[in-house]
Amino acid sequence: MDFHWESTVFAIVAFAILYLLLNKYAFGPLFSVMEKRKAHVLGEIEQAEKSRKEASALLEEQRKAIEQARKEAQDIVEQTRKISTKSAEEMIEAAKAEAQRLKESAMQDIVNEKNQAIAELRSQVGEMSVKIASKIIEKEVDPKAQDQLIDKYLKEVGNR
């Protein structure tokens, strides 16, 4: 095995020329593409982080909106409950007032009917008294007959 230093020098020079040519025409554009890809990936990562932050902010905003909607719904339910309670109380009060009015009207009707019945009874008693007096005057009766006559007319008044 012979060592040829010319071949070695030639191989080193060829390698250096090849390296310079590759560096100028292949490695440069290749590294440039890799740098562009690196910049693009970093940009995408930044964009993703920005999108994640926006999504978090929107999520928090939605949570607040949902909480506000729940609070408003509870307020509406409570207000409706108060209104229905107040309405029920008003209806009860109106019913009580109407019942009181009807009771007073019925009591007034009863008093009127009673007064009318008393007036009618007085009229009838007056008529009966006149009839009794006229019967007594027409016929003088003894005390026993007089008691029988009074009982008869009292029974007659009771039947009417």
Image: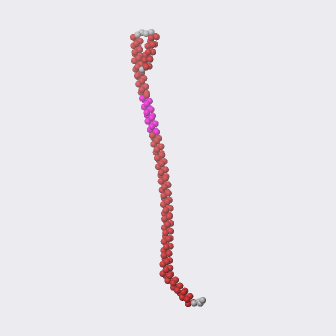
Using the rendered view, name the quadrant where residue 12 is placed.
Answer: bottom right
User: Where, quadrant-wise, is the N terminus in this rendering?
Assistant: bottom right
Q: Is residue 33 or residue 60 the one in the foreground?
A: 33
> Residue at horizontal 48%, vertical 65%?
51
> Residue at horizontal 48%, vertical 48%?
77
Is 97 included in the stretch rendered in magenta?
A: yes
Give the main secondary structure, helix, strand or loop, of the magenta stretch: helix
Does 147 sit above or below residue 85? above
Does 52 sit above or below residue 129? below
Give the image location of residue 54, x and y in percent. Answer: 48, 63
Residue projecting furthest to the right: 1
User: Where, quadrant-wise, is the C terminus in this rendering?
Assistant: top left
Using the rendered view, name the quadrant where residue 100 is placed.
Answer: top left
> Residue at horizontal 43%, vertical 17%?
156
Q: Is residue 6 or residue 145 the one in the foreground?
A: 6
Q: How many marks?
A: 0
Give the image location of residue 85, x and y in percent. Answer: 47, 43
Q: Is residue 56 or residue 112 the one in the foreground?
A: 56
Give the image location of residue 37, x and y in percent. Answer: 49, 73
Residue projecting furthest to the front: 1
> Residue at horizontal 42%, vertical 31%?
105
Question: What stretch of residues is rendered in magenta?
Answer: 92-109
